Image (cartoon, rainbow, N blue to C red):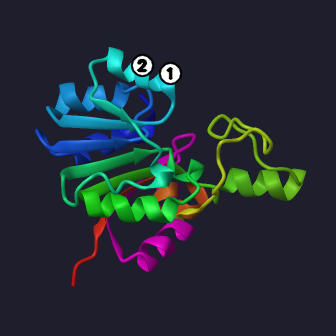
Amino acid sequence: MRYDLTHIMPWVAERSRVLDLGCGDGVFLRALETQRGVNGLGIELDPENLIAAAKQGINVIQQDMDRGLDNLPSQSFDTVVMAHALQVLHHPHRVLKDMVRIGREAIVTFPNFGHWRCRLYLGFKGRMPVSRVLPYHWYDTPNIHFCTLKDFEALCAELNIEIIARDFTAADNRGYLTRWLPNLFGVTAVYRIRHRTG
């Protein structure tokens, strides 16, 4: 399982209701069901992933998040999860607003485009970065909205979204550097958020 997904696990309450946006093949939602006893629902657009998720026994519906999530009632889930999908959305700000409306809490993970390797690659090679974490070229990448940790936090403030907790995955066991300078050394960001009240 991807490292960012292992960070999410402890933030999901046992026997809670979980909505997984962009659930892919359903492996993570299935793990949440077996390890945390959650009642899960997945949303996925890709037909092959839908079939794979259904074969795992996952409740999954086909839907395009970019077209809105108005069919899901407010506060109908305890936690809404979206892992590594924020950067591929056409309207990430709208989906974030929907997430904190639908769920009491939400968890978002995304690659940090402010990581020092991305900066160095672009600065020295003058080309868009290609790496193990970001394996696509500029012309075939599904990533259309690149953001850094600071960008995401600024958007949360603008959308009246409260950051409850945040964590970051680190490359090469440099966890201490990630804690001190997360926007420079964090490879993947993991945020726990909710709608700010009052």
The three-letter amino acid code for the residue at tag 1 is Glu
Q: Residue furthest front?
A: 71
In the image: residue 187, left or right of residue 16: right
Q: Which residues are magenta?
A: 150-177
- As drawn, the residue found furthest toward the top would be 55
Q: Quadrant of residue 142?
A: top right
Question: In the image, residue 179 lies at what x, y percent?
Answer: 45, 59
Viewer-proximal residue among 36 and 38: 38
Any part of residue 191 in sight: yes
Q: Position of residue 17 (x, y in %)?
A: 17, 43
Give whichever of 39, 146 is nearer the camera.
Answer: 39
Give the vertical position of 3 relative to 175 (above or below): above
Q: CA distance from mark 2 to mark 1?
A: 5 Å
At x 59%, y 62%, the residue is 148
Q: Amino acid at mark 2?
A: Ile
* Farthest residue, direction left: 15
Residue under numbered circle 2: 51
The residue shown at (69%, 35%) is 135
Residue 44 picture location, percent across and down: 43, 35
Tell whether 191 sits left or right of 39.
right
Which residue lies under the disc numbered 1? 48
Q: Are marks 2 and 1 in contact (CB under 8 Å)?
A: yes
> Residue 1, percent across and down?
41, 28
Magenta highlight on residue 169:
yes
Instruction: Answer with left or right where residue 71 lies relative to residue 38.
Output: right
SS of the residue under disc 2: helix
Choose between 61 and 188: the one closer to the eye: 61
